[in-house]
Every structure is written in structure tokens, then in C-alpha cells.
Amino acid sequence: MLALGVIGATASAVALLGPAESPKGVRLIAFGRESCAQCGMTISDPRFAAQLQTTAGDIYDFDDPGCLLTFMQQHHPEVRAIYFHAFDADTWLNAEKVALVGGKQSPMGYGLGAVSEGTAGAMSLAEAQRYLQARRRKLHSAAPWAEHAEH
């Protein structure tokens, strides 16, 4: 249905209904037993969990909002729904109602936590995507091999 390479398009696309066998809402994550689809680490801290559901019925769970955003950039899945566990409450937020705040100690160090849209100082998904892209460029340019790559 939708191949999303840019997270900014996600907010309007996640409301689309997928196949009948797709879950309605979040499929529960077995914290402490399931692994992140991006980094492979065990998903243990619910405050940073996220879930991507595709139009094909695949469900990917993540231990960090940054892992989900990175997965989206690398794989361009056809999105049916995206959910983020709220950092500050015991609830799930769909991509249409989420914003991300920086400065958190997230499991993989992306530093993002999900909050309700409208939270002061929070970034939209599109802003968070740009934040991660800039962060990756900065890390790559500071890497020891980057200096020699241009020679």
C-alpha cells in the first residue's frame, strides 16, 4: 500500500487498515523475552518500546524509538500502524498522537522517549527523523575511518 521512506508521511498513513488478520491495536510484547527487530537486544524497558505493523501482517517490536526510526529508514516497510509506549505513562500511543522528547537514557542510546503530541519541547516524528539523520552524520564524520575515506 504505502512504501514509507520518510517518517513525515507516516502520521497520515498509519490510520490505513491492513489485512483482516492484523491485530487491532498493539500486539503485546513479552518484555524480557523478545528481541528488538533492529538491534537484536532484549526488549526489557517498556518505557522505550515501539511496534511497527505492516500491511502484509508482519509485526516488528523495538527496544528503542530510535531503533524503529532507523529500521524505517533502512527497510522502507509498507506501514499499517506504528505504536510507541509512552515514556511517562503506562500506555501506548499511535503515531498520529505521538511526539518524542530528547535527553532520555534510552536502551540503545538514541536518547528519545515517546510522549503525547502537544507536550512542551517535544519533536514530531519528522523532526525526530531529521534529528537521527543529523546525529548519524555527525557520528560518522567523527569516526576514525572517516578522515581517510576521502583520500
Image (tube, grey):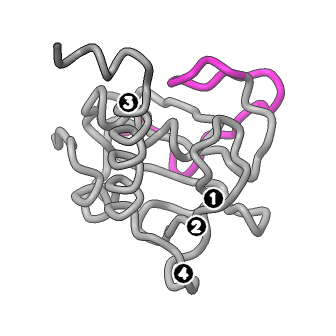
SS state under label 4: loop
The tag earlier along the polypeptide, 4 or 1, is: 1
Prevailing secondary structure class for the magenta stretch in the rendered image: loop
Q: Nearer the viewer, residue 32 or 125?
A: 125
Q: Which amino acid lies under the numbered mark 3 shown in the image of this protein?
A: His
The tag earlier along the polypeptide, 2 or 4, is: 2
Cα gap from disc 2 to disc 1, whole angstroms: 5 Å
The tag earlier along the polypeptide, 3 or 1, is: 1
Q: Which residue is mark 3?
A: 140
- Crowding around mark 4 (Cα neighbors within 10 Å: few <14, some 14 to 19, many 20+) is few
The tag earlier along the polypeptide, 2 or 1, is: 2
Q: Looking at the picture, does residue 118 appear above or below residue 98? A: below
Where residue 37 sits in the image (x, y, percent)?
A: 53, 23
**Residue ID at (71%, 61%):** 87
Cα gap from disc 4 to disc 1, whole angstroms: 12 Å
Q: Which residue is mark 2?
A: 101
Q: Which residue is mark 1?
A: 113
Q: Are marks 2 and 4 in contact (CB under 8 Å)?
A: yes
Query: With 132 as the anchor, is 126 left or right in this view?
Result: left
Q: Are marks 2 and 1 in contact (CB under 8 Å)?
A: yes
The image quadrant that residue 15 belongs to is: bottom left
Where residue 121 is drawn, which disc sits there?
Answer: 4
Cα gap from disc 3 to disc 2, whole angstroms: 23 Å
